[in-house]
Image (cartoon, coloured by chain):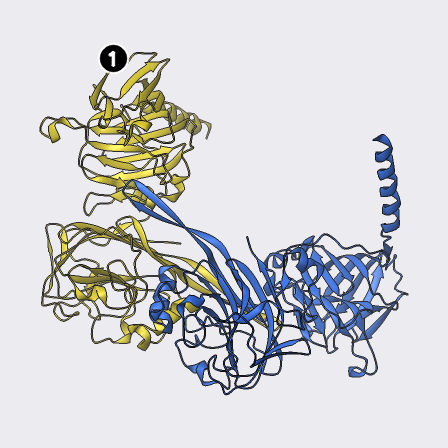
Chain colours: A blue, B yellow
Amino acid sequence: MLRFIFSALFTFVILSAAHAQEWMSLVEDSDLSGWTKLGGDASYEASDGVVTGTTSADTPNTFLATAKTYSDFALSVELWVDPDINSGIQIRSESRDDYLDGRVHGYQVEIDPSPRAWSGGIYDEARRGWLYPLSVNQHCREAFQLEEWNHYYVEAIGHFIRTWVNDVPCAALYDDMTSEGFIALQVHSVPDSELAGRHVRWRNIKITDENVSPRPWTDNYVINLVPNTLSEQEVDQGFSLLFDGESTNGWRGAGKESFPEKGWKVEDGILMVEASGGAESAYGGDIVTMDEYSTFELSLDFKLTEGANSGIKYFITESYGSDASAIGLEFQLLDDENHPDATQGAAGNRTIGSLYDLIPAYEGKTVRKPGQWNRARIIVSGTRMDDAISGSRMEQSEFVGAHVEHWLNDRKVVEYERGTPVFDALVARSKYVVWEGFGHWPQGHLLLQDHGDEVHFRSIKVRTLN
Amino acid sequence: MLRFIFSALFTFVILSAAHAQEWMSLVEDSDLSGWTKLGGDASYEASDGVVTGTTSADTPNTFLATAKTYSDFALSVELWVDPDINSGIQIRSESRDDYLDGRVHGYQVEIDPSPRAWSGGIYDEARRGWLYPLSVNQHCREAFQLEEWNHYYVEAIGHFIRTWVNDVPCAALYDDMTSEGFIALQVHSVPDSELAGRHVRWRNIKITDENVSPRPWTDNYVINLVPNTLSEQEVDQGFSLLFDGESTNGWRGAGKESFPEKGWKVEDGILMVEASGGAESAYGGDIVTMDEYSTFELSLDFKLTEGANSGIKYFITESYGSDASAIGLEFQLLDDENHPDATQGAAGNRTIGSLYDLIPAYEGKTVRKPGQWNRARIIVSGTRMDDAISGSRMEQSEFVGAHVEHWLNDRKVVEYERGTPVFDALVARSKYVVWEGFGHWPQGHLLLQDHGDEVHFRSIKVRTLN
């Protein structure tokens, strides 16, 4: 036994040594020799290892970039920023003659002291815009402290980029666009001269880029831009793919035992419903998951064609025997600008993202046009205990999956409680009033709708919530 | 200055002495000589100052009552109860030949280890039933600890009876039915022999009944059964009367400068709308408060006549210029059983207690028949911050008075959030769709509706919430 312990200890010491991360300081004293200024004309100086960037009027975004490029690394830095200005840290970034005349572009870890408070999110500078907005991570929005030094930790390993602000998990981005590039400290352009002369400071800038081992997996939402894949963190969170990119495994026709023989196809990693004249479930028909779900999180990417109508339905109960599309709650998919149903219903409750014919999506929603990919996400969670007190008795009933959220392109657009009087009143004045017990189901299938228009789906993921 | 301090100190000592409460033990050792058993045949015994009551099969509620009666007093007692049985402490109670053949009746401070958890509430034994149910005080429902000794504090001063369980404020009842009576320890009857032989125990039973000074006022809801009065605690909480019992001061006709000359009258402490044929605001017309309210708590008693229709409206905005009843949100008043509107609307949203034509009242609501008094309560509270994030900007807007509750006879029957997409969707399919901005108003008058049927109002109280 003793021998085993010694053996284990020895092995541990060896492995630890092999995985020891060596941290290197990127700035010593006032030495900025490993850095180059790119972009605008804001100024940088170093003193005692603290880099101070100072805003300047009439100049574009300025970057102090490392000469060296980094692929897999972890970066640790403390920073302080004037509360009136914006800043950021570029990682895996580039400045190339063949891209916007050398403009610095790539992943930027945000420094945002504005009321929006998206510090720790990831913006794709001069390229795709917001990749990881903090609308999906309210907890992180509270991590950054105004007018204090804040600690940022950034980890880039393979496709996975993760950030922490003061040790709160912030962004979790899985992307394969750029795997290597410089690190750069941004001084943002300022809109008027009054904001010139303001400071942003970085200190204790340390990096490790060999044998980088990931921090433990966390429970913040992962934005995964690599089609039909699961990052390790998503696997750890319990997600599985409902579409493998190649087959229709896991799906069947609604009310049928097998997958439709026409109307649907898989091509180039896309599950596609074909155009067939715009009628509801008249050609290939809707498809449903083999499994049923009660509390769950579903996310998928979808791409509409012009004027298209489709939908993602949940809690599908095939026993109703509807002649048309199967009955369930529907996350509406619609080209609002080119399909007449957008103006039907009430208060906009048939527009994209809405709970169809019941609750309109948030007016400020971000919608990408037909031909572009959008992300839909449905969360059904929680158990409500309904108390019924009658005389000296009290009866409690459980309503599982009470709380529902619709997310469209990383913004929450609908939020409601199933089975409440408010919900029942909405149903009673909707097209669903004819279906007994509508929306009170304890579980059901997930469904992709065939509304006779071409619509593309990919990266379909689901996990059960407890 | 020193002289002033000594003087103040001296005065304080004198006043303290004058107000010192002397506590007397009601049970010493095994001595129950000051007590009498009434009602059923459950057993009581005392040992070391602990009174143990034991349930018995086939016997009604049993009471161990003090020979002495108490009017103003404070009672302090610790108690332990078997979690399967119910018990209570009678105060200001009586056993009289001329009432139900001597049956013990009167105020009972509840001991309720059931899931309902109404320990500390006040039940009127063999008389009016629940006076202070804990449906109005969720905080107190968590005060009682199962299978532990719990400390009860009961204070009866003038009309005001208040209770604390483990120092959590529970009941606050203002009532004038009985001002003096005995104290009694209840052993409840049991429904089957399996529950015979179970125990409830009381110890450290102490009372003070001279110079009883009230504990500080607390913020739990006061149930005041004395018409058109305010208890000191309600005054402390900021309530004022909107009806003085004698005049129509504080009210005017909706859309008018003065009070209607016909259709309304004040009689015997009642503000009454007279019968005029059942039409909406056609005779005397609706009346509104002089003042407007934004966040507030309104409570009143109302009594319907058979088949009557009326309503309490809030956020009244007279500028719409409606021909019929003024436009606002309405707590529906209706004789559900005898007025056809109860079956109209959707999902029951025109029945009593409902947010008229929008949200149905809780099905399990308690409704007292025409000719009996009911209590209505409307709470409008809270400010919701709506975030609109657009690009790098974030705009926040305040929605004051976002959360609304309707209470009917001490049960919450409707709960909703004004100005949400769910709310707007409800409005869009209601009779209110024609009124621009319906339900989004920042403040408005309170209104009592003339729907041509005789309805009585009294004890109309309001306070502004912050």
- Please say if B127 is above or below A38: above
- Quadrant of the image occupied by residue B100: top left
- Please say if A374 is above or below A140: below
Whole-percent x, y for residue B421 in the image = 43, 69
- Quadrant of the image occupied by residue B435: bottom left
Q: Is residue B27 visible?
A: no
- Could you tell whether B199 is left or right of A119 in the image? left
Q: Residue at 21%, 43% (x, y): give it.
A: B225
Q: Which residue is mark 1?
A: B33
- Could you tell whether B307 is left or right of A51 in the image? left
Residue flagged by tag 1: what amino acid is it? Ser
Whole-percent x, y for residue A301 in the image = 61, 73
Q: Chain of mark 1?
A: B
Whole-percent x, y for residue A102 in the image = 81, 80
Q: Depth check: A388 or B257 in front?
A: A388
Q: Residues within 10 Å of mark 1 (few under 14, many from 20)?
A: few
- Please say if A266 is above or below A419: below
- Please say if A50 is above or below B183: below
**Which quadrant would the N terminus of chain A be assigned to in this image?**
top right
- Could you tell whether A34 is left or right of B173 in the image? right
